[in-house]
Image (cartoon, rainbow, N blue to C red):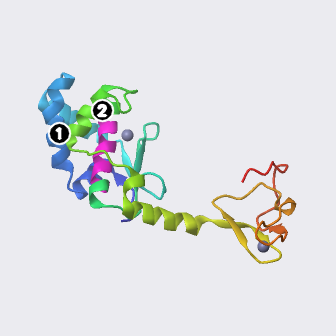
Amino acid sequence: MNFRPMPLPHFLEQEGLRATIETGLRKVAREFGRSEHGFAAAAFASFEDWTVRPSRATTRFGSVSTRTRIFRLTVLDCSEQARRDTILHEVAHIVVFELVSKSERHGPRWQLLARAFGARPSRAGLDLRFRTASAQLRSKREVTVARCTRCGFEVKRLRRSTRDWRRYLHRSCGGRFEPQAPEPQSPPRSADG
Ligand SMILES: [Zn+2]
Ligand SMILES: [Zn+2]
C-alpha cells in the first residue's frame, strides 16, 4: 500500500475519511468550548501544515512528529481496519496538538477525540498481516555479521555488529567465527548474546 508523500487534507480526502473526521470534530466541539463549525474549520485549516509520508517501520503502524508536522503511516501490509484506526488515532493526536494541548499524549481529551472519530485501539503486534509483512522486511534487512569458518553457519543481525567475532566459537560445531562486516569500530564487548 505504497503512496507518495502528500498534504494531510489531500490524504484524508483520498482515504474517504474527511467526513468521518469532520463529523467527529462537530460532535465534540462543545466539550472543547468551540462551535461545531469553528472547531472543524480550525482543525482542517491546521491539517494544511501537515504532510503524510510512507513509513517502513516494522514495529508500528504510524507516528506523528509535531516538530516537523509529519505523519508517518505504514506501507506494510496490514488489515484495512488497522489502517483506518491508525489514521484516525494519529489525526486525533494532530487535532489535540494543534488546537487543545501540546502535551496531552493519550490523555482524556485525546481519548474523547479518538472515540468521536471511531478510532478503535489497534496494536501493530496483534495484526497478523502486519506481523507477517514486518517479519519479511526485517529478514530482508538483516546482514551477515559473521560466518563460521568450519560449517559456514551465518550469524545475521539487523545492524552491523561491533563484537569481535574472532573471539567466539560456533557452539554447535566448535568452529571459529570470521567477521563479515567491516572491522569493529569499538573494542570488543563481553559476550552477552
Ligand atoms: Zn497515539
Ligand atoms: Zn560452525
Q: Which mark is residue 92?
A: none
In this picture, residue 170 sits left or right of residue 82:
right
Considering every residue shown, the one lying at the far front of the view is 172
Please provide percent x and percent y for residue 81: 26, 56
Q: Mark 2 and mark 1: span between their CA atoms?
A: 12 Å
Does 1 lie within the magenta span?
no
Q: Nearer the viewer, residue 121 or 171?
A: 171
Q: Residue at x 31, y 61 (%)?
A: 79
Q: Which residue is mark 2?
A: 110
Q: Is residue 43 visible?
A: no
Q: Which residue is mark 1?
A: 24
Q: Residue at x 43, y 61 (%)?
A: 131
Query: Looking at numbered disc 2 in the image, what kind of residue is underneath it?
Result: Trp
In the image, the residue with mark 1 has its CB under 8 Å from the nearest atom of ligand 1: no
Considering every residue shown, the one lying at the far top of the view is 33
Q: Is residue 152 above or below residue 119?
A: below
In the image, the residue with mark 2 has its CB under 8 Å from the nearest atom of ligand 1: yes
Does 85 lie within the magenta span?
yes
Q: Quadrant of residue 142?
A: bottom right
Please provide percent x and percent y for residue 132: 44, 65
**Magenta range:** 83-95
